[in-house]
Amino acid sequence: MTLPLALVFYEDLIPGTQLVNRLQDSKYRVQVVPKLDELTACAAQVGPMLIFADLASKNGDVCTVIRKLRQETATAHIPVIGFADDGNEELQSAGRTAGATLVVADSVILTHLTQFIEQALQVE
Protein backbone atom coordinates (compact mmCIF):
# COMPACT_ATOMS: atom_id res chain seq x y z
CA MET A 1 0.00 0.00 0.00
CA THR A 2 1.29 3.43 -0.93
CA LEU A 3 1.57 5.91 1.90
CA PRO A 4 -0.05 9.34 1.42
CA LEU A 5 2.30 12.10 0.32
CA ALA A 6 2.77 15.41 2.12
CA LEU A 7 4.78 18.27 0.63
CA VAL A 8 6.54 20.48 3.15
CA PHE A 9 8.10 23.88 2.58
CA TYR A 10 10.10 25.45 5.39
CA GLU A 11 13.19 27.57 5.92
CA ASP A 12 13.37 27.55 9.73
CA LEU A 13 14.86 24.22 10.83
CA ILE A 14 12.64 24.17 13.88
CA PRO A 15 9.75 23.37 13.51
CA GLY A 16 10.38 22.32 9.88
CA THR A 17 12.50 19.24 10.54
CA GLN A 18 10.35 18.26 13.51
CA LEU A 19 7.25 18.46 11.31
CA VAL A 20 8.88 16.24 8.68
CA ASN A 21 9.81 13.67 11.34
CA ARG A 22 6.34 13.70 12.89
CA LEU A 23 4.67 13.24 9.50
CA GLN A 24 6.95 10.29 8.76
CA ASP A 25 6.10 8.82 12.18
CA SER A 26 2.42 9.25 11.21
CA LYS A 27 2.98 7.11 8.10
CA TYR A 28 3.22 9.86 5.50
CA ARG A 29 5.73 9.97 2.70
CA VAL A 30 7.26 13.41 2.93
CA GLN A 31 8.84 15.43 0.18
CA VAL A 32 10.53 18.63 1.27
CA VAL A 33 10.39 21.40 -1.31
CA PRO A 34 13.44 23.54 -0.54
CA LYS A 35 12.65 26.39 -2.96
CA LEU A 36 9.41 28.30 -2.61
CA ASP A 37 9.19 29.03 -6.33
CA GLU A 38 9.08 25.27 -7.04
CA LEU A 39 6.16 24.48 -4.73
CA THR A 40 3.31 24.95 -7.22
CA ALA A 41 4.96 22.98 -10.02
CA CYS A 42 6.00 20.21 -7.63
CA ALA A 43 2.47 19.95 -6.21
CA ALA A 44 0.99 19.72 -9.71
CA GLN A 45 3.48 17.04 -10.69
CA VAL A 46 3.39 14.73 -7.66
CA GLY A 47 -0.20 15.20 -6.44
CA PRO A 48 0.23 15.29 -2.66
CA MET A 49 -2.57 14.71 -0.19
CA LEU A 50 -1.49 17.75 1.84
CA ILE A 51 0.86 20.72 1.67
CA PHE A 52 2.48 22.24 4.75
CA ALA A 53 4.00 25.69 4.31
CA ASP A 54 5.91 27.90 6.70
CA LEU A 55 4.37 31.30 6.00
CA ALA A 56 7.55 33.15 6.98
CA SER A 57 10.08 33.11 4.17
CA LYS A 58 13.12 35.25 3.51
CA ASN A 59 13.14 34.21 -0.15
CA GLY A 60 9.63 35.00 -1.33
CA ASP A 61 5.99 35.52 -0.47
CA VAL A 62 4.42 32.25 0.62
CA CYS A 63 0.94 33.79 0.50
CA THR A 64 1.39 34.56 -3.20
CA VAL A 65 2.31 30.91 -3.78
CA ILE A 66 -0.78 29.76 -1.85
CA ARG A 67 -2.93 32.00 -4.07
CA LYS A 68 -1.31 30.42 -7.13
CA LEU A 69 -1.97 26.93 -5.76
CA ARG A 70 -5.64 27.89 -5.40
CA GLN A 71 -5.82 29.28 -8.95
CA GLU A 72 -4.28 26.28 -10.70
CA THR A 73 -6.73 23.53 -11.67
CA ALA A 74 -4.21 20.79 -10.83
CA THR A 75 -3.61 22.05 -7.28
CA ALA A 76 -6.74 23.97 -6.22
CA HIS A 77 -8.14 20.96 -4.33
CA ILE A 78 -5.04 20.23 -2.24
CA PRO A 79 -5.40 21.25 1.41
CA VAL A 80 -2.71 23.68 2.56
CA ILE A 81 -1.78 23.98 6.22
CA GLY A 82 0.19 27.15 6.84
CA PHE A 83 2.11 27.79 10.02
CA ALA A 84 3.75 30.89 11.49
CA ASP A 85 5.08 32.28 14.75
CA ASP A 86 2.53 32.64 17.56
CA GLY A 87 2.83 36.39 17.73
CA ASN A 88 2.64 37.03 14.01
CA GLU A 89 -1.12 37.52 13.67
CA GLU A 90 -0.66 39.62 10.52
CA LEU A 91 1.12 36.78 8.71
CA GLN A 92 -1.38 34.21 9.96
CA SER A 93 -4.25 36.37 8.72
CA ALA A 94 -2.52 36.84 5.35
CA GLY A 95 -2.24 33.05 5.02
CA ARG A 96 -5.96 32.62 5.60
CA THR A 97 -6.77 35.38 3.12
CA ALA A 98 -4.48 33.78 0.54
CA GLY A 99 -6.50 30.58 0.71
CA ALA A 100 -4.73 28.31 3.17
CA THR A 101 -7.12 25.63 4.37
CA LEU A 102 -5.85 26.06 7.90
CA VAL A 103 -3.32 28.37 9.53
CA VAL A 104 -1.83 27.44 12.89
CA ALA A 105 0.87 28.63 15.25
CA ASP A 106 4.13 26.77 14.80
CA SER A 107 4.30 26.19 18.56
CA VAL A 108 1.24 23.89 18.45
CA ILE A 109 1.49 22.26 15.02
CA LEU A 110 3.33 19.22 16.35
CA THR A 111 1.16 18.81 19.44
CA HIS A 112 -2.10 18.79 17.48
CA LEU A 113 -0.86 17.56 14.10
CA THR A 114 -3.36 14.71 13.79
CA GLN A 115 -6.31 16.99 14.53
CA PHE A 116 -5.06 19.64 12.09
CA ILE A 117 -4.68 17.04 9.34
CA GLU A 118 -8.17 15.69 9.97
CA GLN A 119 -9.61 19.20 9.91
CA ALA A 120 -7.80 20.12 6.69
CA LEU A 121 -8.91 16.93 4.95
CA GLN A 122 -12.61 17.35 5.77
CA VAL A 123 -14.69 17.58 2.63
CA GLU A 124 -16.94 20.60 2.65
Image: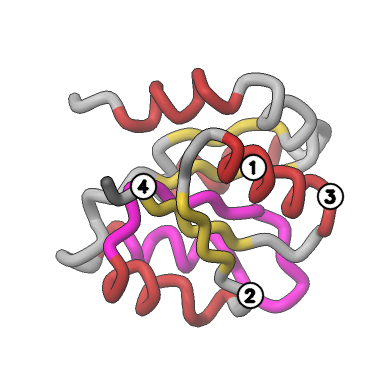
Question: Looking at the image, is mark 1 or mark 3 earlier in the sequence?
Answer: 3
Q: Residue 14: horizontal and vertical position, in percent?
A: 84, 49
Q: CA distance from mark 3 to mark 2?
A: 14 Å
Residue 3: mark in rendering: 4
Secondary structure state at the residue bearing disc 4: loop
User: Could you tell whether 73 is left or right of 7 in the image?
Assistant: left
Q: CA distance from mark 1 to mark 4?
A: 23 Å
Q: Please name the amino acid that badge 1 sits on.
A: Phe
User: Could you tell whether 34 is left or right of 52 in the image?
Assistant: right
Q: Nearer the viewer, residue 35 or 55?
A: 35
Q: Please name the amino acid that badge 3 sits on.
A: Ile
From the viewer's perspective, is residue 65 above or below residue 45? above
Residue 83: mark in rendering: 1
Q: Please name the amino acid that badge 4 sits on.
A: Leu
Magenta stretch bounds: 47-69
Is the C-beta separation of discs 2 and 4 under 8 Å? no
Q: Which residue is mark 3?
A: 14
Categorize mark 1 by other alpha carbons within 10 Å: few (<14), some (14-19), many (20+): many
Question: Looking at the image, is mark 3 or mark 2 earlier in the sequence?
Answer: 3
Q: Please name the residue shown 27% across and 62% down the image.
A: 47
Is the C-beta separation of discs 4 and 3 under 8 Å? no
From the viewer's perspective, is residue 58 above or below residue 15? below
